[in-house]
Image (cartoon, rainbow, N blue to C red):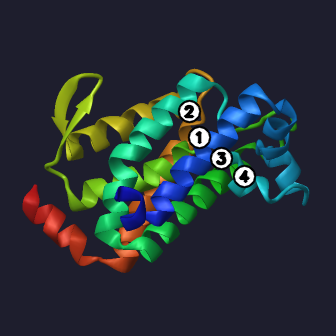
């Protein structure tokens, strides 16, 4: 069974869905406790929310989109990298994307953020380095992974500058960077193979 071969991805998947649904439907105080407020962290409070914010989501649509993406990329990446390396990749992605938000919004007491998007971006971009030609179905449009990566970064960069929507696009960018750096540290030859593949 998939869960036995990918224990970390399975545990994160189940925990994120369970905690998010609990926070959204039964325990709104849990959502408030887990959400990350960069201003608080910059002033030495609630540092645990750097991690906990990745296990709660703002609504069902947010949770569904993230978990579908997680399902299609995290489980294959754990099988490919191994459990220990996948755990480090996801954790580094979550922390790095959170810290980017802390740096940018540390002086804004009204700002709060939540969701697993930054960590999932790290997994997604690590996947793209190893499998650039893999076809992805993006809003029912097939495209190679490397093309999706270019469009994703361009859209996130533009949206972060324009502050489009109620989405933490900076976390997406920082998570993507975390995934790329992770692969560079553990397997720099992957970029040689990527260049040859393209």
| Residue at the (34%, 71%) spot, across then down | 81
Mark 3 crowd level (few <14, some 14–19, many ≥20, 10 Å Cα): many
Percent from the top left, x then y, of residue 138?
Answer: 28, 29
Q: Earlier in the sequence, mark 2 or mark 4?
A: 4
Percent from the top left, x then y, of residue 15?
Answer: 61, 50
Percent from the top left, x then y, of residue 106?
Answer: 79, 47
Mark 2 crowd level (few <14, some 14–19, many ≥20, 10 Å Cα): many
In the image, residue 10 above or below residue 160:
below
Q: Earlier in the sequence, mark 1 or mark 4?
A: 1
Numbered disc in front, either 3 or 1: 1
Report the residue marked by disc 4.
Answer: 52
SS at badge 4? helix
| Residue at the (73%, 35%) spot, across then down | 22
Q: Is residue 118 left or right of residue 56?
A: left
Report the residue marked by disc 2.
Answer: 63
SS at badge 1? helix
SS at badge 3? helix
Q: Quadrant of residue 181?
A: bottom left
How far apart, in angstroms, are the residues tagged by discs 1 and 4?
13 Å
How far apart, in angstroms, are the residues tagged by discs 3 and 4?
6 Å
Report the residue marked by disc 1.
Answer: 17
Mark 4 crowd level (few <14, some 14–19, many ≥20, 10 Å Cα): many
């Amino acid at each position: 069974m998939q869960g036995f071969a990918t224990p970390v991805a399975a545990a994160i998947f189940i925990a994120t869905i369970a905690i998010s649904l609990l926070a959204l439907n039964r325990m709104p105080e849990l959502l408030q406790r887990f959400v990350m407020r960069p201003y608080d962290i910059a002033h030495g409070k609630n540092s645990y929310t750097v991690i906990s914010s990745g296990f709660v989501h703002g609504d069902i649509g947010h949770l569904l989109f993230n978990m579908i993406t997680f399902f299609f990329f995290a489980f294959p990446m754990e099988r490919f990298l191994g459990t220990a390396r996948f755990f480090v990749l996801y954790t580094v992605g979550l922390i790095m994307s959170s810290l980017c938000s802390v740096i940018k919004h540390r002086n804004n007491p009204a700002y709060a953020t939540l969701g697993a998007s930054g960590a999932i971006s790290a997994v997604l971009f690590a996947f793209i380095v190893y499998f650039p030609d893999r076809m992805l179905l993006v809003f029912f449009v097939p495209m190679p992974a490397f093309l999706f990566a270019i469009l994703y970064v361009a859209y996130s960069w533009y949206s972060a500058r324009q502050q489009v929507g109620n989405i933490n696009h900076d976390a997406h960018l920082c998570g993507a960077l975390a995934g790329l750096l992770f692969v560079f540290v553990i397997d720099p030859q992957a970029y040689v193979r990527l260049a040859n593949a393209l």
